[in-house]
Amino acid sequence: MRDVVFTRQSGWIPNVIREDGELKLTLGAGADANHDPRTFTFSISEAHLAVIQEDLARHLLLWSAVLPLCDAAGTRGRLDERAAVALLDPILLAAPADVDALFQRIPWDRRRLIAHGADIGLLERGQVCAAMRAATETSNEKRAQEYHANHRRAERGAALGPLDAAMLRYTGQYLHGATVPRRIPDAVDPALLPEVMRVIATAERACAGMRIGRDPRRGKRATDRRDWARMETTVQAAVRRAHPELVDDAVRTVSFLMCSEAAGRAGTPMEDDEAAADHRAERGGRAMKTALSFTDDKGAEKKWLRNSPRTAAAEFWEFVGDRSAADNEVFTIEDEEMGEGIQLHFYADSIARITTLREGEGGADPEYRVEYCLVDGIGGYRNLVSAFVRGGCAALEHHGPWLSDVAEFERARRRRDTR
């Protein structure tokens, strides 16, 4: 039989229950292997209950001291009840000076107390009882998150000035640096907003006309890392020149914002290739290929015919975006009618063009000419694919040099990779 004896407004603050006639403190903390919340209980006395009911500060201090024991229990371990019970008298019944001294010796969850209104300055000076005079039952998690973010910055020596903090608030990255940035002018002190907007204007001018494309080798929505790095470097250099007072965190958040927005505006390679094909069609151009076969290293195949509503290049890059993976990095485009094709080796930044010299007759194997070429990133691959689907292997000639000797090609690849 379990009855709730005492509970506070916040459901997370430990409750007191009576179970089979015995008083116990119960709290939810951590999670099990299935990510469901774990519940821990340990025995308390009537004297402990009286303090918990009357003194919110002591109740919260006890909670902050028990939480590390819950963390130590992990996903399936047992709470060290003897250690938990040993905290009761020193926290709930001892003099304030003794409580302060205890908290110098034991682990405790500082963020819990800060979320419930603790004075941060007093906490950091070790005056935990005095710090809890303004404690509240309701929690302010944002206050705790801001403290944690500032503490992390302090650990790596990053001190924010008012404008630095305003830049991080504007992009929504003040609390979490990994958050996708966005523009939040309402989060900034109105007095600092004009300065923030001047920094943003500097960044926008620096990257005007630059773009970040997609890289289907890493999935449909993956961005071209080179484009990203180029824009990031350009924006950071411009912002540092114009606003040397900004710390690195503020400069990085501005470049992250510019790059994220550019990536969001980018069309997929499939869309870009179709737009290019439309432009060529307006100028009277037309693809030479009538049918192509796309394959990957896992045996998947996709056919493209000339009457398809989409270009061959667009269909191929969609096939790559759907199928490319760490263990699937070789893709082929073959024109069976013309007896030629190309094989893309994403793992090596290289490509092979394959031409049939003689068909196999009388059980003999066909004879092929295979030539290799190094490729400069996804932009290089897209140029080669577009050229092939328009004009076959002959159209690739000026994209070389093409090497037929495998050993010579491997030496060229090693020289490139060591530069």
Image: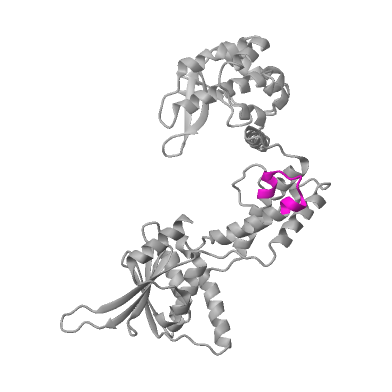
**For the view shown, which residue lies furthest in the bottom direction?**
284
Q: Which quadrant of the structure image shows residue 365?
A: bottom left
Magenta-drawn stretch contains 247: yes
Q: Give the tally of numbered discs.
A: 0
Q: Image check: 168 left or right of 369?
A: right
Which of 30 and 385 lies nearest the eye of the viewer? Answer: 385
| Position of the N terminus by quadrant | top left
Q: Image check: 155 left or right of 368?
A: right
State the extent of the magenta-drawn residues as a range. 239-252
Residue 380: x and y, percent? 49, 69
Q: Which quadrant of the structure image shows residue 123?
A: top right
**For the view shown, which residue lies furthest in the right direction?**
191
* Residue shown at 45% from the left, 63% from the top: 217
* Above/below status of 145 relative to 67: below
**For the view shown, which residue lies furthest in the left direction?**
362
Q: Is residue 383 visible?
A: yes
Q: Is residue 182 visible?
A: no
Q: Image check: 368 left or right of 159?
A: left
Residue 172: x and y, percent? 67, 48
Q: Image check: 159 left or right of 328?
A: right
Magenta-drawn stretch contains 346: no
Which of 235 and 319 lies nearest the eye of the viewer? Answer: 235
* Residue shown at 49% from the left, 28% from the top: 71
Which of 313 and 310 lies nearest the eye of the viewer? Answer: 313
* Above/below status of 343 relative to 22: below
Residue 69: x and y, percent? 50, 23
Residue 263: x and y, percent? 60, 61
State the predominant SS element of the stretch in magenta.
helix
